[in-house]
Amino acid sequence: MAITQLKGSSASGRGAPRNDERGLSRKACAAIVVLILIRTAAGVGIVMKTARPAPLASVAALPAPAAVFGSVSGSAWLQRNSGGSDILRGMHVYLLPKLIPTDPAKTLAASWIPDLQRSRDDWKRMLQDHQKSTKYGFMKNDSEDKDYQERIARDEADLGHAKSFQSSPPQMDALAIYQELHGHGSIAPAFISNSVQEVTTSVDGKFQLSHIPAGDWYVFAIIHTSTTLVEWIIPLHITSDKNTPLDLFNDNATVVDEL
């Protein structure tokens, strides 16, 4: 008996896949491959992203350099006109900042004004009286007139400085203040009020200012007795912790008056 093979069937009885089924299978496989590739790429990206090295930590700030504190020390003495010398015992020595407020000096200068005006007016009155007396031939002395006039001029100059200083800036170099007002009155109280350190010379005239921060300073000292007026204002530059030697004597004094 002849066996008739059905169209589209195999001899074994299993149906062979049609063309459209084979095409669908290929598309499905391709889609699966693409999906795998996408997931693989995404995974690689994640790995790469997480595998990036962490940013470098910021460099720690370098420690600040150690503060520098120096010192200054020396002896104080005065050479007399007579040829002898005196050790300056018990003299106050002050440390001044380079820049100091001007208010204390302004207040001090303003306090001079009434006395200077009174002194100037007294000298003017004395000059007028003298000129009246010489008009009639009594006590005629031109040098005395000149002396009165010089005193009046000096008081006028001191008044001018005391008044003009009131318009000074809030801070000035201590030496500039000294130069502006020195000779017109005692500037010491304004300097003493601005000092940051004070010592007294020992029985042998020695002194030491210590623990001075690096920078620019002034050493100020004054001795005023019934026979002597001496002042010092000396620049001091501290750059290390070494001691700076400084003697106070005639040659570096700003004022030396034997009264």
Image (spheres, rainbow, N blue to C red):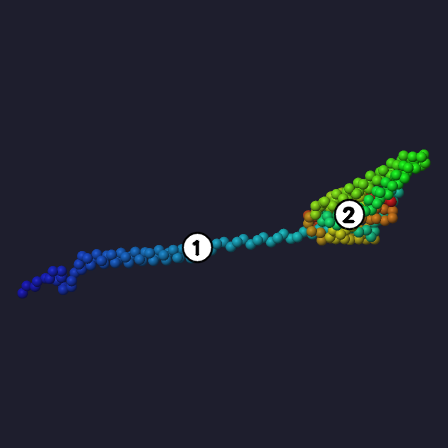
Instruction: Categorize mark 2 by other alpha carbons within 10 Å: few (<14), some (14-19), many (20+).
Output: some
Picture quarter containing residue 134?
top right
Q: Give the SS element for disc 1.
A: loop
Q: Where is the C terminus found, in terms of image quarters?
A: top right
Q: Where is mark 2, residue-wise?
A: 110
Q: Position of residue 103 (x, y in %)?
A: 73, 49
Q: Amino acid at mark 1?
A: Arg
Q: Give the SS element for disc 2.
A: helix
Q: Can residue 17 be seen from the camera position used here?
A: yes
Residue in view at x 60 percent, y 54 percent: 63
Q: Amino acid at mark 2?
A: Ala
Q: Where is mark 1, residue-wise?
A: 52
Residue in view at x 14 percent, y 64 percent: 13
Toward the viewer: 62 or 180?
Answer: 180
Q: Where is the N terminus found, in terms of image quarters?
A: bottom left
Toward the viewer: 96 or 194?
Answer: 194
Q: Position of residue 223 (x, y in %)?
A: 82, 49
Picture quarter containing residue 24?
bottom left
* Residue with the most extreme left position: 1
Q: Can residue 73 be seen from the camera position used here?
A: no
Q: Position of residue 118 (x, y in %)?
A: 84, 45
CA distance for labels 1 and 2 = 74 Å
Contact flag, marks 1 and 2 (Cβ < 8 Å): no
Residue in view at x 85 percent, y 49 percent: 225
Residue in view at x 88 percent, y 36 percent: 145
When the figure is inspected, residue 245 is found, relative to residue 14, above or below; the finding is: above
Instruction: Categorize mark 1 by other alpha carbons within 10 Å: few (<14), some (14-19), many (20+).
Output: few
Q: Position of residue 218 (x, y in %)?
A: 74, 47
N-term mark: 1 or 2:
1
Toward the viewer: 259 or 153?
Answer: 153
- The number of numbered discs placed on residues in the rendered structure image is 2
Direction from residue 141 to residue 196 in the image, left or right: left
